[in-house]
Amino acid sequence: MSGTRVPQRGAILLGTAGGLLAVSGLLAASYYVVASRAEAHGVVHASTSETAKVATGTTALAALLAKPVTLVASGNTAQLTWSDLGVEIDPDELGRAGAVDSDADVAKLAAKGSLPVRVDRDKAVAALRKLKGRYDKTPTDAYLDLEERAIHDDVMGEGIDVWASLPRIEAAAHQAAPKLDLAMVAVPANVTKAGLGIDDISQVLGHYKTTFPVGEHDRGFNLKLAASKINGTVLAPHQEWSFNAQVGERSEKEGYKIAHVITAGEMVDGLAGGTCQISTTLFGAAFFAGLDIPKTTNHSRPSVYTPLGFDATVVWPDTDLVLKNPYDFPVAIHYRVSNGEAVVEVLGKKRPFDKVTFAREILEETPFPSEERLKDDMPQGQTMIVQPGFDGYKMTRFRRFFVGKKMVREQKWTVNYKPVTEYTERGTSTDPEVKPVPEKEVHGPKPPTNDKFEMSQ
């Protein structure tokens, strides 16, 4: 029985409880609706207040960010706004900054270095790179002023360090600083005075000059090209130097042109004609400067631009002119080719000799042979010399060094020139239509007037 009545009582209680629960649920629901509406109404008021606060702060900060700041770089100044430098309001910091309702609030935050701003790095980098183009100071390389015989020192450059300047911009922006010193970095010159390898070019140790016809444009071009590869060369103390190694191959690829050259004792047109005049003129200056000459070869025939016995030929790659600096100080080579002159100076400190003399003494002389060439494009009876003959010579070349009037050193070389064949052309044509060939102007070296010769510097 009890077992059956308990469920019935439970059903009644459960029904009562259910009714109460329903009522309470209704009340709760009504309360939730009211509370939710009230809460929603409150949030609207709070959001409006915060938005107003943000808007006020944004307006005050925006006005600040539109103001100019003075940037200092390499002693120069520029003015950009904070916005130009990529400074912008930081929304996250704005909420934690406190009151920013007025310029006074902004000034107060700036005094503490806590303005709610951040830096747009990409925009800042772009602005700094533009400033680099205007204010970076390019370094100046040291150089030899060979004409003035002076050495100009290098000058350090300076540039804006973009990445190191970014934290400076951010720190200055937090304080609204009126001036900002950008980070600078020193930019060294590519060539320093020490890197030149020489500290004194005030003295001319030796010089030499040769001439060439200004009308021979291709030869003049070759002379200038080869000389340009030597001009400014510095020889360190006791350094050995090679003409071929410095000048390189004299090829069409390198820009050389066809001009007169000596081949097998005969003057003909050939590539890079004139290069031997460059080596000969350099030889002369080095001779009087007192430089050692470990390797030199005279021409197969004398040259018109230098005295007999005072020349040096070069042929790529085997026939070379080698010089060596015997001094404890460096020397520089100044080479100039212009207006029909090739001029070389060896510059450095004062040489230890008062005078250097070139002397030659002819030991043997061999008469030149003659050769006639028949030409069927010349009328019979016409003859002309196309290459003057020149006797062969064997001689001794001396270099003598003097301190005061006393000779303190003497060097000597044996120099040989083979006889230069004289070539004559004779016409054989009997055709009356064949016209005489115009005479060619030919030049050759002048024979020595005596067995001995000397010149000094």
Image (cartoon, helix red, strand yellow):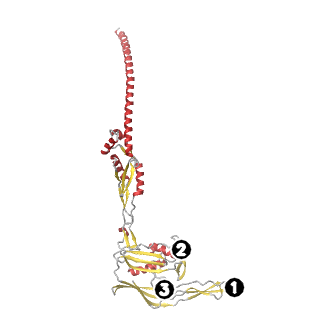
> Mark 2 highlights which residue?
257
* Residue 54 on image: x %, y %: 38, 38
Residue type, numbered disc 2: Lys
Indicate which disc, 2 or 3, sits on the residue closer to the N terminus: 2
Please state which of residues 127 and 402 is positioned toward the viewer in this rendering.
127
* Amino acid at circle 1: Pro
Residue at 50%, 90% in the rendered image: 366
Residue that lies at the very extreme toward the top in this rendered image: 1
Select label 3 or label 1 by which is in front: 1
Label 2 crowding class (10 Å Cα cut-off): few <14, some 14-19, many 20+? many
Does residue 107 show up?
Answer: yes
Height in image: 33 above or below 439? above
Q: Quadrant of the C terminus?
A: bottom left
Between discs 3 and 1, the one toward the N terminus: 3
| Observer-nearest of 439 and 110 | 110
Question: Could you say whether the residue bearing mark 3 is in a helix, strand or loop?
Answer: strand
Question: With respect to residue 100, does 385 lie above or below?
Answer: below
Lower position in the chain sequence, tag 1 or tag 2? 2
Give the CA distance from mark 3 to mark 1.
43 Å
Q: Are marks 2 and 3 in contact (CB under 8 Å)?
A: no
Badge 2 marks a residue whose secondary structure is loop
Question: Is the residue marked by circle 3 packed among few (<14), some (14-19), or many (20+) residues within 10 Å?
Answer: many
Residue position marked by numbered label 1 in the rendering: 432
* Foreground residue among 253 and 349: 349
Please state the horizontal and vertical placement of residue 45, each as a whole percent of the image: 38, 30
Residue named by callout 3: 417
The amino acid pointed to by label 3 is Tyr
Per the model, the C-alpha gap separating discs 2 and 3 is: 27 Å
Mark 1–mark 2 distance (CA, rounded to whole Å): 39 Å
- Residue 321 seen in render: no
User: Quarter-wise, where is residue 183 in the image?
Assistant: bottom left
